[in-house]
Image (cartoon, rainbow, N blue to C red):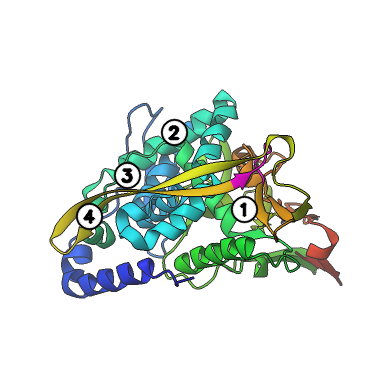
């Protein structure tokens, strides 16, 4: 399989542009908004950015917190949010042309967009309103001139579409797929191996991999409990996470690390507890005697090429690629192992699940229940007592402490 190079090519173009337009792109860019008032907000929200990159949010109610979070992500992580969304929706081809087709075809067969919409529809009204508020803040931020003048947006002539509430769940699913862990060494079929090779190329394109090398540990010395968290996420120079501090009477004071394009915190600290999540989403490969049990079928995914920027011109491409794949009624993908045997890949992201409620529970001090991520985490209470929510092979005890 030919290595994917569309990110590298775009980066080279962008870097060349940066060298010539550094002063105009950065020195003259307006400062981030210090205080925002968006329609439908209960009150003003203060969003401040400090020199170390930490964003501070002060808001009145829960929905205002989510609106401000969306505004912060759209202001401080606009390109990371946009490129993750573009990949999650299988639309990289509209920016990068033919070089994005292979990845888009791969993502299209994952059905991230469809299952994200279904997962959003299955949420209760309160959870939906939080994602709506986040999308509202994102859209307000993405409409700023400073976002339209971002170098990659200008170079690629990227069309910034409105942010829909379910787009956040599509990014959540893409992130879970990038962190997916599966024991598949025994699977040798070319069809499956090619599929997983494209996944590896997707990880390499974003330089997001190696999450299973992350760690959280706690230990007690002299009646003081120390908590540490290390997130390993490859070698990306593009920041896909945002340090945020939140102060609101509607929830505990919180500081933590949120995934770009989402209000979901992988690590955080409140006055009552601290936590760190090891982002792993487990998949399983199982033998299947046939790929047509109980109504299994061949499904079709399509990849559409749109307008592609080239030099001074933008050419419209009307082209659609069809990608067939096998799926059983429960959403699992089926691959031919040989002429008479098949394997099926089971992954929670193929179903209509989301961890939106679990991440919110962490923010307000409730017990989280993860369904997409494995929920491998270390939690340390204010009393100094720690709880490791991880299977035995994911945690290690040592004298006076624990490692996850």
Residues under numbered marks 3 and 2 in contact, where contact means CB atoms less than 8 Å apart = no
How far apart are the alpha carbons under marks 3 and 2? 13 Å
114 in relation to 110, above or below:
above
The structure residue drawn at horizontal position 69% and vertical position 43%, both measured from the top left corner, is: 371
Instruction: Write down the region rendered in magenta.
Output: 326-332
Q: Secondary structure at mark 4?
A: loop
Res 269 label:
1
On screen, residue 136 versus residue 106, left or right, reads left
* Residue on which the image places disc 2: 133
The structure residue drawn at horizontal position 17% and vertical position 69%, both measured from the top left corner, is: 21
Q: Secondary structure at mark 3?
A: helix
Label 4 neighbourhood size at 10 Å, few (<14), some (14-19), many (20+)? some
How far apart are the alpha carbons under marks 1 and 2? 23 Å
**In front: label 4 or label 2:** 4
On screen, residue 144 versus residue 75, left or right, reads left
Please report whichever mark, 4 or 2, sits nearer to the chain's N-terminal start. 2
* Residue on which the image places disc 3: 141
- Residue 208 visible from this viewpoint: no
Please report whichever mark, 3 or 1, sits nearer to the chain's N-terminal start. 3
Label 1 neighbourhood size at 10 Å, few (<14), some (14-19), many (20+)? many
Label 3 neighbourhood size at 10 Å, few (<14), some (14-19), many (20+)? many
């Amino acid at each position: 399989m030919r290595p994917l190079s569309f990110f590298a090519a775009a980066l080279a173009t962008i870097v060349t542009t940066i060298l010539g337009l550094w002063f105009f792109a950065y020195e003259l860019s307006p400062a981030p908004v210090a205080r925002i008032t968006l329609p439908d907000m209960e009150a003003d929200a203060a969003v401040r950015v400090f020199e170390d990159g930490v964003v501070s949010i002060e808001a009145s109610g829960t929905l205002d917190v989510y609106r401000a979070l969306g505004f912060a992500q759209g202001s401080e992580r606009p390109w990371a949010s946009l490129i993750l969304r573009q990949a999650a929706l299988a639309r990289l081809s509209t920016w990068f042309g033919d070089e994005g087709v292979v990845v888009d075809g791969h993502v299209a067969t994952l059905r991230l967009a469809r299952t994200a919409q279904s997962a959003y529809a299955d949420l209760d009204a309160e959870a939906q309103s939080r994602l709506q508020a986040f999308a509202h803040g994102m859209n307000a931020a993405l409409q700023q001139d400073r976002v339209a003048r971002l170098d990659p947006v200008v170079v690629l002539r990227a069309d910034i579409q409105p942010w829909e509430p379910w787009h956040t769940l599509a990014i959540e699913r893409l992130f879970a797929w990038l962190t997916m862990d599966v024991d598949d060494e025994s699977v040798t079929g070319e069809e499956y191996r090619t599929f997983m090779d494209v996944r590896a190329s997707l990880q390499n394109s974003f330089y997001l991999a190696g999450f299973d090398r992350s760690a959280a540990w706690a230990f007690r010395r002299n009646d003081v409990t120390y908590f540490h968290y290390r997130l390993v996420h490859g070698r990306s120079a593009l920041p896909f996470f945002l340090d945020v501090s939140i102060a609101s009477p509607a929830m505990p004071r919180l500081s933590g690390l949120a995934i770009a394009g989402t209000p979901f915190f992988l690590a955080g600290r409140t006055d009552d507890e601290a936590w760190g999540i090891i982002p792993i989403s487990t998949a399983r490969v199982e033998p299947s005697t046939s790929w047509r049990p109980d109504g299994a079928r061949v499904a079709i995914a399509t990849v559409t090429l749109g307008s592609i920027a080239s030099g001074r011109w933008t050419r419209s491409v009307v082209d659609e690629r069809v990608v067939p794949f096998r799926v059983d009624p429960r959403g699992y993908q089926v691959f031919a192992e040989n002429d008479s045997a098949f394997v099926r890949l089971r992954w929670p992201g193929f179903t209509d699940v989301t961890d939106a409620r679990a991440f919110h529970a962490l923010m307000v001090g409730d017990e989280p229940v993860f369904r997409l991520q494995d929920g491998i985490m270390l939690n340390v209470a204010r009393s100094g007592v720690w709880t490791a929510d991880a299977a035995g092979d994911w945690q290690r005890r040592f004298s006076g402490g624990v490692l996850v």
